[in-house]
Image (cartoon, grey):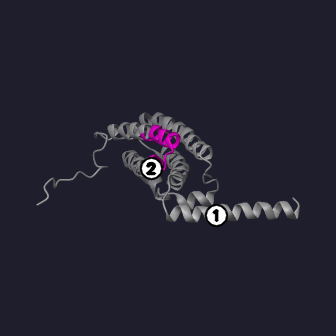
Amino acid sequence: MTTDVKDLVEEKYQAEVKQADIDHHTPTAGAMTGHIVSNLRILDVKLHQAKWFMKGFEAAAVRPLYDELIDQARKDYDMVAEALLDENELPPSTTEEYSNYKMLDEDGRNKYLTTSEMVDITAHDYNTENLFVTRAIKLAEKEDRPALAATLTTLLKQNNHAIQQLQALLGKTAWEGLVEEDDDDDDD
């Protein structure tokens, strides 16, 4: 690479870093969706961790679902990143960026948990992901980005179905233990 090309690459990269910093301090649909892309990359790792380390009789029954979830998470990762590119946004694309923008927690200790505990963590991860998805949908609608909002709505539907399947394995309804209900309907 010539010096001129290196300088141009560096200039573009520094502009990207500066814009990413601005976007993440003033939430935009693009920035929020960047968090989603990062979460999807981490979710793939966490789904593998759970699948690989499940033990006991229930593990044999649960692994096929995890294979489906892994396949879907990988498709979603590409779908959402491509939607950002279509919107002239830059999705996170390095391990450092995923680490900086992810909101899902990883823990090597999880491999020693029971299969049910791993399933519960996975359901909570999808619920956490949905916090960002619903916020990004609202921002996309506010910013008049209907294609991005549609992609994110598809992701929300798929995440909700994953939650329902995982919760059913635990003997729970779709949102039981994930969504806090407001017990105080009075304004007294």
Q: Which-is-in-front pick, marks 2 and 1?
A: 2
* Residue at position x 57%, y 57% in the image: 98
Residue 97 visible from this viewpoint: yes
On residue 177, the disc is none
- Which one is earlier in the sequence, the residue at label 2 or at label 1? 1
Which residue is disc 1 drawn over?
17
Q: Is residue 143 magenta?
A: yes
How many numbered tags mark residues here?
A: 2
Q: Nearer the viewer, residue 165 or 130?
A: 130
* Residue at position x 60%, y 51% in the image: 91
Q: Quadrant of the C terminus?
A: bottom left
Which residue is disc 2 drawn over?
142
Please tell me whether mark 2 sits on a helix, a strand or a loop.
helix
Residue at the right extreme?
2
Residue at the left extreme?
188
Q: Position of residue 112 (x, y in %)?
A: 44, 53
Q: Dot 1, how many residues are within 10 Å of its Cα: few (below 14), some (14-19), or many (20+)?
A: few
Q: Dot 2, how many residues are within 10 Å of its Cα: few (below 14), some (14-19), or many (20+)?
A: few
Please tell me whether mark 1 sits on a helix, a strand or a loop.
helix
> In screen coordinates, is 102 left or right of 172?
right
Q: Which residues are magenta?
A: 139-156
Q: Nearer the viewer, residue 154 or 112?
A: 154
Q: Position of residue 92 (x, y in %)?
A: 61, 54
Q: Is residue 146 magenta?
A: yes
Secondary structure, magenta segment, majority class: helix
Rendered view: 59 above or below 19? above
**Kind of residue at disc 1:** Val
**Kind of residue at disc 2:** Lys
Q: Position of residue 83 (x, y in %)?
A: 57, 43
Q: Position of residue 28 (x, y in %)?
A: 50, 56
Q: Quadrant of the N terminus?
A: bottom right
Separation of marks 2 and 1 at Cα, in angstroms? 24 Å
